[in-house]
Image (spheres, helix red, strand yellow):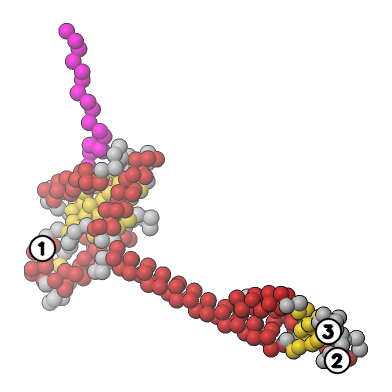
Amino acid sequence: MPLFSPPGDTGFSRFKTFARRNLYLGAALGLGSPLGLLGIRYYFDHRLLVNSWLLWELRDHGEYYMYAGVGTVLAMGLWGLWGGRKADVQRTRAEALERAALRLRDMADTDGLTGVFVRRHLLEKLDDELRRAERYKYPIASVFADVDNFKAFNETHGHMVGDEVLRRIAQVVRAGVRETDIVGRYGGDEFLVMLPHANAREAFSAAERIRRGVERLTVSDKAGAPVPMTVSVGVIAAVPHDADVLRFLDIADQALHRSKGLGKNCTILCDVPSTEPAAPPPKEKPQ
């Protein structure tokens, strides 16, 4: 005798309708886990028919035998939920590790004192920008700013005051250029700014904003007395004909040294034609 015959009475039909509605949720949860997939495959391989919350087995002599399947379905659903939560935890951990890696990379690329790029990363950026400017034939400018008499200032007022001066000058430099421009600390008291798509006039204006901004800084020594601060600035702006970073910076450095030679606290724009490739010597005409 079978445990149950196929249901046909009204009471069982109502139970069947209720059970089927809830089975779909459990089955959907079960499908989300490997165990659920294996379980469903097992049912079909063994000629088991899922009917509501019950499992009906078709015996060889044509009778159905019913087994309680609600526990299995719910187990599959719970397993699917657990697997989904575990995946969420793993994804959260992976995202946290990725954020930590990005922070470490930013720390390696950023100067801890001033908050601008370090020299290594700055040169990498400049190399990329020069190659891009050479390829697409657009102008690029660099502004070299050097703090005047900074070594003597450090020896007189101490490194703590000197560090504060560098921090404040870095803020002035960033405030004097566009958000898309790249600012870095090239040396101890030297700052370098790259200005993509900037011509000579725009670069010179940015350099003057930086110079005047530093000139207006209010800096005090340990005793509270005001100390004047100035920078000398060299500027280069051109459409590069080669992506030679060292040559590009050497021209800007020459302009910077000219600025210091003229009494400091001034801005010098280098000769734009100096970035052009040298013309080949004229060929001698055959006799």
Look at mark 3 in the image and give the residue it sits on.
Answer: 64
Task: Give the mark nearest the N terminus, 2 or 3.
Answer: 2
Which residue is the extreme one toward the front? Answer: 61
Of 217 and 73, nearer the camera is 73
Residue in the picture at 52% in, 80% down: 86
Q: Which mark is residue 244?
A: none
Q: Which residue is mark 2?
A: 1
Upstream in the sequence, badge 3 or badge 1?
Answer: 3
Q: CA distance from mark 2 to mark 1?
A: 103 Å
Q: Nearer the viewer, residue 279 or 40?
A: 40
Tell me if mark 2 has few (under 14), some (14-19) or many (20+) residues whose alpha carbon lies within 10 angstroms of its own. Answer: few
- The nearer-to-camera label among 2 and 1 is 2
Residue nearer the viewer, 266 or 102: 102
Residue type of the residue flagged with mark 3 = Tyr
Callout 2 secondary element: loop
Residue position for label 1: 151
Q: Secondary structure at mark 1?
A: helix
Q: Which residues are magenta?
A: 270-287
Secondary structure of the residue carrying numbered label 3: strand
Name the kind of residue labelled 1 in the image. Lys
Q: Is 31 in front, or is 162?
A: 31
Q: Position of residue 203 (x, y in %)?
A: 30, 48
Looking at the rendered structure, the kind of residue marked 2 is Met
User: Mark 3, residues whose alpha carbon is within 10 Å: few (<14), some, or many (≥20)?
Assistant: many
* Image vertical order of residue 29 relative to residue 98, above or below: below
Q: Can residue 12 be spotted in the picture?
A: yes
